[in-house]
Image (spheres, coloured by chain):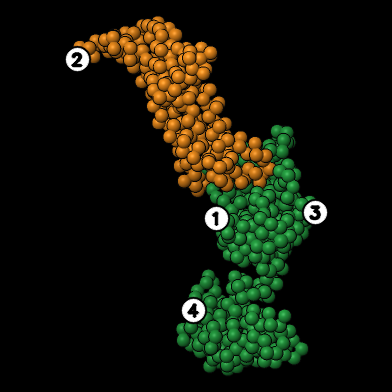
Chain colours: A orange, B green
């Protein structure tokens, strides 16, 4: 019991005094996961749109594969990437192992499927009538895609936010690819693992609180987005003010 | 303006449209009528180049539309379409109306002027900056019409534009369609399953049944001289079948149906089997015990009232004359004449009000 109370007191102290090490770990976590999320979005949004807007043989299978990868264990991604980028692996020459760049790459691999899948379902959620309407108004194929992606903007944004949530909370890739090196690749999740093992509960709890606050911010953003969406839906359901 | 030649569109094994040949003239309002699922939307979508035919050709202003994508886009941009269910994008009304201009690269200041004019045209200037998804169905359809007209199309295609609207909004849209046609000379092709709407608006009407274009003509032609029993039924006539021409003197024919003889005008020769199309509103009823008045009615048939169906300010009365004959009279005359179920009446039909159709089996025999 005293571990917990002492830990919490110590954690609050570390946060309030802006302990340099705690802040450095939190900042690195945010940097890595935000970068991974941004890069993943740059890949996943066009890729999802490409799959959605084209008909090709095996499209259904591709979508099923993407959905399966939603739940790929982080340690499996870590393992495969480790084998690929370790010194003896085919991409060993890139020197990515135990670097933040390697971690960014790993988190991208981890969240691209979920983002792509959610982008595809966001686009499927747009009424087919919109597509016909845009074409009949003289849109080129490209202009049509841009407008439909814009129309699905809220749902696509929540796909991105969800991807970020998965990236910042994962521990497998960070540990196996990053290696938890102090000041270099130590992030919130790996630090919590390590410090807990060493019995430094206060430090762990402080990091845990920060992680939860970040999660809270993510959820609040998601809620703001969905409430913006659903108020639109309510207006449609109610037939609008003129109803 | 638009020439359609032997157009067929199949979806799998099902032919949604079969061998349609049709010419739509510049500046006319052409309506396609037919039951739901008969292929009207398929035809309109093909004209707007949203879909490609399985076989056959569409010429736009003399140009074959089956060219490369780029050429099809150029042709498509000379048309506009309004759909049955208006799809608005989640932006302001003005931005929704501006889409066609944006796609064509029209500069913003010019676009703004055109958008304002288009919204003024449909009477929605007040809603300029409103979010489009908050509009009512009727308003959305008017926005869709403004959006279609803002690019000044040569051809405006409308796919059942009033099917989901209340009567007041429908009337407003109909009114706008006619005004657009008169003011800008826009060629209008509209589909509807409401035959009366087709009649109200159209210069010419095409009837589509089960994927085939079965008759093209003016409203009176379609409504008084349907080319077949199916069309007759769709335009509100239950044809009397099983007649035979027993005499024909210079187009003045005597036709026997069961025990009754009709006088009618037709060129179909003696001996042929025929059906008779009589519009219910052309049938008069008088109680059978009333003193026979002088009348120009050549055909007076005695029958018993079988069914009385109210239909707005009118009533449809089915009379059993050995064959069913339907009369449409006002509710007031029904009361005044004291008509009720089972009462005997004399049904009168002018010879000129009967449209005679040769029956299919006999037409082939006649060659």
Which picture quadrant has residue B356?
bottom right
Q: Nearer the viewer, mark 4 or mark 3?
A: 3
Mark 2 lies on a secondary structure that is: loop
Instruction: Confirm or deny contact between disc 1 and disc 3 (CB under 8 A).
Output: no
Q: Whole-percent x and y of residue B16?
A: 61, 60
Q: Is residue B359 above or below residue B121?
A: below
Tag 3 or tag 1, which sits nearer the N-term?
3
Q: Do the residues indicated by labels 4 and 2 lie within the same chain of the protein?
A: no
Q: Nearer the viewer, mark 4 or mark 2?
A: 2
Instruction: Confirm or deny contact between disc 3 and disc 2 (CB under 8 A).
Output: no
Q: Which mark is residue B164?
A: 1
Please rate how many residues cluster around mark 1, counting C-alpha atoms within 10 Å: few if below 14, some from 14 to 19, many from 20.
some
Give me the chain letter of mark 3. B
Residue A107 seen in the current view: yes
Mark 1 lies on a secondary structure that is: loop
Question: Which residue matches tag 3?
Answer: B62
User: In which quadrant of the rendered image does the C terminus of chain B lie?
Assistant: bottom right
Query: Label 2 vs label 1: CA separation?
Result: 67 Å
In this view, the residue farthest toward the left is A1
Query: Label 3 vs label 2: CA separation?
Result: 89 Å
Mark 4 lies on a secondary structure that is: strand
Question: Which residue matches tag 4?
Answer: B308
């Amino acid at each position: 019991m005293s571990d917990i109370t002492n830990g919490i007191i110590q954690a609050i102290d570390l946060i309030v005094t802006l302990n340099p090490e705690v802040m450095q770990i939190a900042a690195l976590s945010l940097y890595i996961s935000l970068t991974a999320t941004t890069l993943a979005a740059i890949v996943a949004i066009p890729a999802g749109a490409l799959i959605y807007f084209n008909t090709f043989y095996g499209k259904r299978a591709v979508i099923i594969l993407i959905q399966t990868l939603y739940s790929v264990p982080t340690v499996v991604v870590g393992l495969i990437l480790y084998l690929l980028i370790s010194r003896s692996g085919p991409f060993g020459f890139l020197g990515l192992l135990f670097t933040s760049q390697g971690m960014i790459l790993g988190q991208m691999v981890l969240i691209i499927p979920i983002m792509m899948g959610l982008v595809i379902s966001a686009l499927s959620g747009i009424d087919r009538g919109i597509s016909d309407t845009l074409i009949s108004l003289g849109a080129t194929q490209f202009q049509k895609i841009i407008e439909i992606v814009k129309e699905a903007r809220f749902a696509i944004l929540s796909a991105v936010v969800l991807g970020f949530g998965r990236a910042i909370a994962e521990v497998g890739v960070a540990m196996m690819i990053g290696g938890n090196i102090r000041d270099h690749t130590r992030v919130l999740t790996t630090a919590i693992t390590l410090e807990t093992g060493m019995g430094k509960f206060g430090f762990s709890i402080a990091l845990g609180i920060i992680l939860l606050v970040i999660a809270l911010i993510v959820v609040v953003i998601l809620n703001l987005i969905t409430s913006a969406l659903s108020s639109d839906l309510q207006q449609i359901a109610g037939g609008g003010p003129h109803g | 303006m638009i020439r359609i030649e032997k157009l067929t569109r199949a979806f799998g094994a099902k032919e949604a449209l079969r061998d349609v040949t049709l010419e739509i003239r510049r500046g006319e309002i052409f309506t396609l009528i037919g039951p739901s699922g008969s292929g009207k939307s398929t035809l309109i979508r093909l004209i707007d180049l949203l879909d490609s035919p399985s076989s056959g050709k569409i010429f736009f202003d003399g140009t074959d539309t089956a060219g490369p994508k780029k050429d099809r886009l150029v042709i498509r941009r000379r048309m506009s379409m309004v759909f049955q269910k208006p799809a608005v994008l989640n932006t302001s009304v003005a931005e929704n109306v501006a889409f066609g201009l944006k796609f064509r690269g029209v500069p913003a200041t010019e676009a703004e002027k055109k958008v304002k004019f288009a919204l003024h045209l449909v009477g929605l200037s007040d809603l300029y900056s409103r979010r489009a998804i908050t509009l009512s169905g009727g308003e959305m359809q008017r926005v869709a019409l403004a959006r279609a007209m803002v690019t000044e199309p040569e051809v405006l295609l409308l796919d059942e534009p009033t099917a989901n609207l209340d009567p007041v909004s429908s009337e407003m849209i109909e009114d706008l369609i006619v005004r657009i046609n008169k003011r800008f000379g826009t060629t209008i092709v509209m589909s509807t399953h409401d035959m009366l709407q087709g009649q109200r608006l159209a210069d010419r009407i095409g009837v589509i049944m089960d994927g085939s274009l079965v008759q093209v003509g003016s409203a009176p032609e379609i409504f008084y001289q349907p080319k077949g029993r199916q069309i007759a039924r769709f335009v509100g006539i239950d044809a009397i079948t099983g007649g035979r021409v027993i005499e024909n003197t210079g187009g003045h024919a005597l036709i026997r149906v069961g025990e009754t003889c009709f006088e009618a005008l037709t060129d179909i020769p003696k001996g042929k089997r025929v059906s008779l199309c009589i519009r219910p509103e052309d049938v008069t009823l008088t109680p059978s015990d009333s003193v026979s008045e002088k009348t120009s009615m050549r055909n007076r048939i005695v029958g018993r009232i079988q069914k009385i169906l109210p239909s707005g300010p009118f009533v449809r009365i089915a009379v059993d004359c050995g064959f069913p004959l339907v009369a449409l009279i006002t509710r007031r005359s029904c009361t005044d004449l004291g008509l009720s179920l089972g009462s005997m009446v004399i049904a009168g039909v002018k010879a000129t009000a009967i449209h005679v159709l040769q029956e299919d089996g006999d037409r082939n025999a006649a060659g």
